[in-house]
Amino acid sequence: MNTEHIVGKSVPRKEGRDKVTGASKYVDDLVLPNMLFGATVRSQIPRGRIRKITFGPGIAWDEFVVVSAKDIPGKNCIALIGDDQPCLASESVNHSEEPILLLAHPHRHLLPQAVAAISIDYEPLPAIFTIEESELRSEIIWGEDNIFKTYKIDKGDGDGVFDGIWEKADYIVEGEYSTGAQEQLYIENNGMIAAFDAAEGITVWGSLQCPYYIHKALMALCNLPAEKVRVVQMETGGAFGGKEEYPSMIAAHAALLAIKAGRPVKIVYDRMEDMAATTKRHPSRTRHRTAVSHEGKILGGEIDFTIDGGAYATLSSVVLSRGVIHAGGPYYWPSVRIRAKAVATNAPPHGAFRGFGAPQSLFAMERHMDRIAQTVGLSPAEIRRRNFLQPGQATTTEQVVREPIDLRGLLDRALEVSDYHAKKRNFAKQNQLGASKKGMGLAAFLHGAGFTGSGERYLSSVVGVEGCADGSVRVLVSSTEFGQGTKTVLSQIAAEALRLPYENVSMAQPDTLEVPNSGPTVASRTVMVVGKLVQSAALGIAQTLISSGLLREGYSADEFRAACRQHVATHGPFRSWSRYEAPSGIFWDDQAYRGEAYAAFAWAVYIAEVTVDLTTYGVSVNDFVALQEVGKVLHPLLARGQIIGGVAQGIGFSLYEKVVWQNGRMQNGQMTNYIMPTSSDLPPIRVFFEELGNIHGAYGAKGIGELPMDGPAPAILNAVEDALGVGFDSVPLLPEDIMDGLAAASPVGSTGGGGGR
Amino acid sequence: MGSPQRRRLGRQAEAEVGDRTMTDFSASHGKAEILLTVNGEPKQIRAYPMERLLDVLRLECGLTGAKEGCGEGECGSCSVLMDGVLVNSCLVPVLQAVGASIVTVEGLAVGDALHVMQEAFLECGGAQCGICTPGMILAAVHLLNGKPEPSMDEIREGLSGNLCRCTGYSQILEAVAEAARRGSSLSRSSIQRTGSMRTTV
């Protein structure tokens, strides 16, 4: 019997060899016989009515396949949560880059000219571009009030406790914080190929995260039954949330062209189209008003969290939900009143991006903690230490912390490994001279794993494991690999469960014809939630073999393979299924927004060391410590890679990545002017794990993917304030912002937000 | 920001191939016969002179390892070696590659035996989604060809023309350092597999 553990070991990435040899096939690497290329004609204005479409001269239009909204067999929408987003605009447009027409032609290089030759005459309507304009409601662009969704959380409100806090407070600290849009900037642009056959239905192959989202969208759009829609994931070159919902749109477009053309159609965006038209991180504004005691304890407060959802609802309600639940950070709030809303603007819809609302609200919380510390006169570390959630206490949604988490211990360790105190003292001295200033900043935070509240129950994910003819097993999930290591870690889990060598487990290609719906690959849920199901489905395979008498308990790997081969030889391939069941004791009230928001949280303390150059006002991060408790680490190499990659995106979010908008259109949609970090821009990112385990996850794992996005922005901006003595409350923070901020700062007391009393 | 080194290399490549005798492209509207060597194999291709080397490699040669990430020489995912020099193949008209020896990621492994850089990427976690990996590996091979024992800072600088959104680069840098360690103890012949014999002393 194999006693060596496979989980916890850094086994080779399943698809690694194909990736390093260039053998992996991404959607643009796939060429189907007789295939056409598709392109999208998009709105040039943010809002208006379409009066007339003219096909200009000089183009052999009879060679082109042209699709408009009239060609849609089913419902003209991208079915997701609501059905408000059209697949193709027909009468009016609500944002720049909104798709209006589709073209296809055998020659890819002829498409840009054809797109440019189509002119659309609009009756323009007034458009709105900011949260504040949307709130004014001078123009109603969505529903009755421009509001996609609101949430409210009230804790300690029922007995009048809340009303008393302002009187009891020694300090009332206020602040307003904002975050900008951020492009996911996967290096592989979005792309899809569709083929249609009257008997088989529609098949799409593409770069995507969620096969069954697309499956659902195509059924509604094409008016086809489930069995006539097939979605296949190709190797996917990065996603980060950016390929969660928008691929449904591209699949829909490719499908419409393929149906009309009777030939396969490939649509692959170029970088500019991808940047301009697809989703980005929701811009946000958070206002805090906090009652604090003289010893620095939070007594209660109000948090107002607002995100800009763009022109259609898409996923904004869910992003808002995660942002709201994380808005109070890893702190104990005796009472709190949180109000949140997602509003409409005439920008392309904002969407999923790693962290999903939490980086926005946690940025505010962690900047605000530093503001509270200053007001009270405590250090940033001490103010957090005094307010950390303790086991047995309840979060803002009244979820009692049952894990034996020790946040003070995490903080102490992070301070130690970053050499925080000694550096801070040295910098305070060094900063008095010289043309640069250094600072240290920290952020403490949490990130819930899996879908929020009743989400996992609603998803009801299914996972399969198959016994194969050669004695190996194959995992059947719709969970997709896009760099994070899905294939590797789920294989480890199955191998561990069956005590088989890792090499004896393979992963089916995500193809809706073959794999069950194990839910979307989002929300840091794959390892924890889907992994647990893989574990139990794998055990079902062993049970089948044992109960059929082919295998004994305590089998060896050789015996398993022999039994599996024999079972398949006699009965054919066999499968074991496992469906999600909510753990007992998980209660969630969607109306009151109260209860167990997540089955588990990951916890972290991040510390940034920065230098601000007073000549260029450039900020460089010199050292970064990322310490987290993520349950059991199943694959140390991949886990560390996830954290470093997330921190790098967080550094980009903090200091480099600014979407420049004009009339709701991105002006800097190129890699030359939308700046993400290169290898030269990043510090050593030092990763530390604490492992407490987690009863809800496979072998004690929690979610890990999104967590590292939450901490860098507040840690870095707190460090900038430590360096300069002047604080900034918006990201991205660019050199020009620092120049302006320093110029505007009065010598004393300009950084404190709220008045003490 | 950006890729200063890459731009420098681009110019260098241009200078190196600039004097080579070209096929007659007087009939510039049509396709021309283009001769070049790809991964050691001579290729005769019919292509428009201004077609991008990237498209010729992907569509005519069936070598899809080089990827298009930005189409403007910023991301480096289309990197290939042209006569031992690292170029963004999205910026090279195939005309410029006439007579040149091109190495793509497909040309690194010999049979089942991975190149030392590919092995190091696998072992150190240098590949996540994989889309930047072919270009990143070629940039790393090019770096070590010129500088077999680079410092960490030199690796950071040397790869700064290739963007990766997944890894935050650390594990890529570690892979390159690991390959350098192993490469220094390897026989010359295995290093020459990179097709960059000119720069290998």
Image (cartoon, coloured by chain):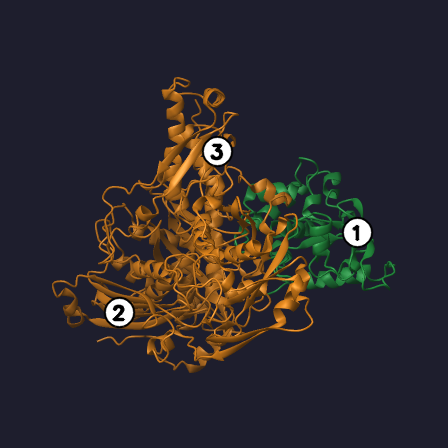
Chain colours: A orange, B green
Q: Position of residue A746 (x, y in %)?
A: 38, 82
Q: Position of residue A439 (x, y in %)?
A: 43, 66
Who's the residue at 40% across and 43% down the image?
Answer: A518
Question: What amino acid is labelled 1 in the image?
Answer: Ile
Question: What amino acid is labelled 3 in the image?
Answer: Arg
Say whether mark 3 and mark 2 are on the same chain: yes
Alpha carbons under labels 1 and 3: distance apart: 42 Å
- 1 vs 2, front mark: 1
Few, some or many residues within 10 Å of mark 1 (<14, 14–19, 20+): some
Few, some or many residues within 10 Å of mark 3 (<14, 14–19, 20+): many
Callout 3: chain: A
Q: Nearer the viewer, residue A256 or A536?
A: A256
Who's the residue at 37% across and 38% down the image?
Answer: A533
Q: Position of residue A637 (x, y in %)?
A: 49, 43
Nearer-N-terminus badge (2/3): 2
Residue A18 sits in quarter: top right
Up the image or down, A596 lies above or below B184; here it is below
Question: What amino acid is labelled 2 in the image?
Answer: Val
The answer to whether one can see residue A188 in this image is: no
- For label 3, the residue is A474
- For label 1, the residue is B45
Mark 2 secondary-structure assignment: helix
Per the rendering, the mark at residue A376 is 2
Up the image or down, A744 lies above or below A573; here it is below
Q: Nearer the viewer, residue A224 or A736?
A: A224
Alpha carbons under labels 1 and 2: distance apart: 74 Å
